[in-house]
Every structure is written in C-alpha cells, then in structure tokens.
Image (cartoon, rainbow, N blue to C red):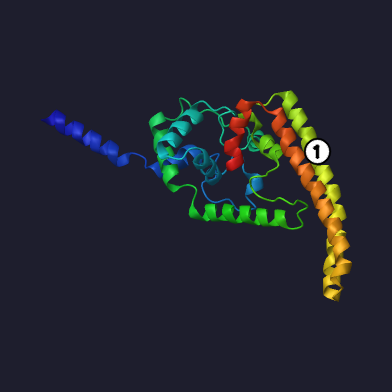
C-alpha cells in the first residue's frame, strides 16, 4: 500500500511540475526565434526567422496539425535546406538551423509543434502580412508598364530564385535564369522610363482640357510601349519554363499558387 501511495505521489508531482507547452517553447526556441510579432526595428537584428514567419510558411505548406507536427519533429532533428518551408534566399541569409537531435525530447518537440500550430501566426501578424501583400500588389500596379497584371502571370524567375534549393535547379539552369531575369528587368526599366513622361503629359493635358484628338497619339505611344513591355514579360515566362524539366515544373506550381 505504501509503495502504491509513493508511486502516485511521484506521478502527481511529475505532472504538477511538468513544463507547459508555452514554457517548452520559450526554453527551447526563444534563444534563436523571436516569439512575438517583430517590429520593423527588430527585423534587421534577427538571427533566425521570427516564429510568426516560420509558422506562416509551415501552414502554407502543411494544411493540418498532424502533417505540420511530423514536419517540425523531423526538420528540427534533421534540418536540411531542401526541406525548408522558407524561401531559398531567406535560408541563405539566416543559414540552416542547427539540429536539436539529442538535446530536446521528440515528445517535447511534438508538444511545441501542436502549441505553435494552435497559436501561431497570431491574428496581428497575419493582418500585417496581408496588408503588406495588398500594398505590394497595389504599388506594383501603380505605373505598371504591363498590359497584364494578374497573379497568374508572374515573373517566374523571381519565384525560382526564391525557391531554387527546393526545386533542384542545376548551376547551369540557375545561370540561364539569372540572365533572363537581368535582361527582363533592364528591358522593362528602359520602357518605364519612356512611359513616365508620356503619362505625365496626358495628365497635364487633361487638366488643361486639351482636345481628345491631341491626346490620342500620345496614348497610342503609351499603348505601344506597354505591348513591348508585356512581350518582354511573356518571353521571361516562356523562357524560364523552357529551362525547367517537367518534374521541376511540378515542384514550382505550389510556389506559383501561394
């Protein structure tokens, strides 16, 4: 009887003093990952992605708690840049996280993972990211030199540069894509410089109440330049696709849609 009582006391004490999920997160992750929403001043000083950003990317790839848990338990013990859910340029900037294998019990990692999935990213961080993306899209449309601005017609080279560790591009493919991107950016920049004064002239003519017949030739010049820019954009997309294998294209599509 005494033995049973002692065992019950021992078990209840262990349960009483067991660390909570929040405490496990803080003690095992906070030394590298910021656990609160980063301020603009904090972002340049971070030595690892903020946990808000980590979980935003995890949830973009893993749509349920179980698959996210399996990923986090595996990745934290056996980290590799090809497994990362963050963009390749972010991984290059921060480096691959060190393994915590043998340092943190996998059961505790699973507990931390479930807690993260339930609590991160916060509504505040999600709203901030949504606003940034919305503003980014709006800014991209201001003075756009393209006839097509939809999400389904992106600069594929940008997506590839951000994620090429996960897509498995060869060095030769990377070099070809960088040439395409450089030519695209320089070509579009030159056209934007031609469009800007023409658009300013149209605005000035509208304020002065100039006749439509006088405005039409200038608008036709702008339209012609936008056709040129859109063709450059189109060649960027088709040229990038031509460099990829079918298997690589399948790996690109989730990043294209995200």
Q: Quadrant of residue 116?
A: top left
In-front residue for pair 146/28: 146
Q: Name the secondary structure under disc 1.
A: helix
Assign the N terminus to one quadrant of the image: top left
The residue lying furthest to the front in this view is: 213
Q: Quadrant of the C terminus?
A: top right
In-image side of 224 versus 156 (left or right): right
Percent x, y of residue 101: 48, 26
Give residue 206's position: percent from left, percent from top: 82, 71
The x, y position of residue 222, in whole percent, is 83, 56
Between 203 and 135, the residue placed more toward the observer is 203
The answer to whether residue 88 is above or below residue 151 is: above
- Rendered residue at 71%/53% (across/down): 140
Please give the residue where the numbered disc 1 appears in the rendered image.
182
Is residue 86 among what the camera can see? no
Task: Please name the residue shown 80% across and 52% down the image.
Answer: 226
**Residue located farthest toward the bottom when viewing the structure as drawn:** 209
Between residue 46 and residue 198, name the one nearer to us.
198
Relative to 104, is 170 on the left or the right? right
Closer to the camera in the image, 228 or 243: 228
Quadrant in the picture for residue 66: top left
Count the marks. Answer: 1
Residue 3 visible in image: yes
Give residue 36's position: percent from left, percent from top.
52, 50
Q: Quadrant of residue 81?
A: top right
For the residue carrying disc 1, how many other residues have a C-alpha within 10 Å: few (<14), some (14-19), or many (20+)?
few
In the drawing, does residue 75 fall left or right of residue 10? right
Determine the residue positioned at 54% across, 56% down: 127
Q: Is residue 176 above or below residue 37?
A: above
């Amino acid at each position: 009887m005494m033995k049973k009582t002692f065992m019950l006391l021992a078990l209840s004490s262990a349960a009483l003093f067991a660390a909570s999920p929040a405490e496990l997160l803080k003690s095992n992750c906070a030394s590298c990952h910021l656990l609160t929403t980063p301020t603009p001043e904090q972002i340049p000083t971070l030595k690892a992605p903020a946990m808000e950003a980590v979980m935003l990317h995890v949830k973009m790839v893993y749509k349920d708690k179980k698959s996210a848990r399996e990923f986090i338990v595996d990745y934290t013990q056996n980290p590799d840049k090809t497994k990362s859910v963050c963009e390749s340029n972010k991984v290059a900037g921060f480096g691959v996280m060190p393994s915590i294998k043998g340092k943190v019990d996998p059961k505790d990692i699973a507990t931390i993972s479930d807690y993260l999935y339930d609590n991160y990213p916060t509504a505040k961080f999600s709203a901030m990211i949504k606003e940034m993306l919305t503003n980014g899209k709006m800014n991209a449309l201001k003075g756009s030199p393209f006839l097509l601005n939809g999400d389904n017609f992106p600069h594929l080279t940008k997506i590839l540069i951000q994620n090429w560790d996960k897509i498995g591009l060869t060095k030769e493919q990377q070099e070809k894509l960088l040439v395409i991107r450089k030519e695209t950016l320089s070509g579009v920049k030159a056209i934007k410089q031609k469009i800007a004064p023409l658009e300013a002239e149209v605005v000035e003519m509208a304020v002065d109440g100039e006749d439509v017949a006088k405005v039409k030739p200038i608008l036709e010049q702008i339209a012609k330049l936008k056709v040129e820019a859109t063709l450059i954009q189109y060649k960027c997309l088709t040229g990038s696709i031509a460099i990829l294998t079918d298997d690589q294209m399948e790996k690109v599509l989730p990043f294209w849609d995200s």
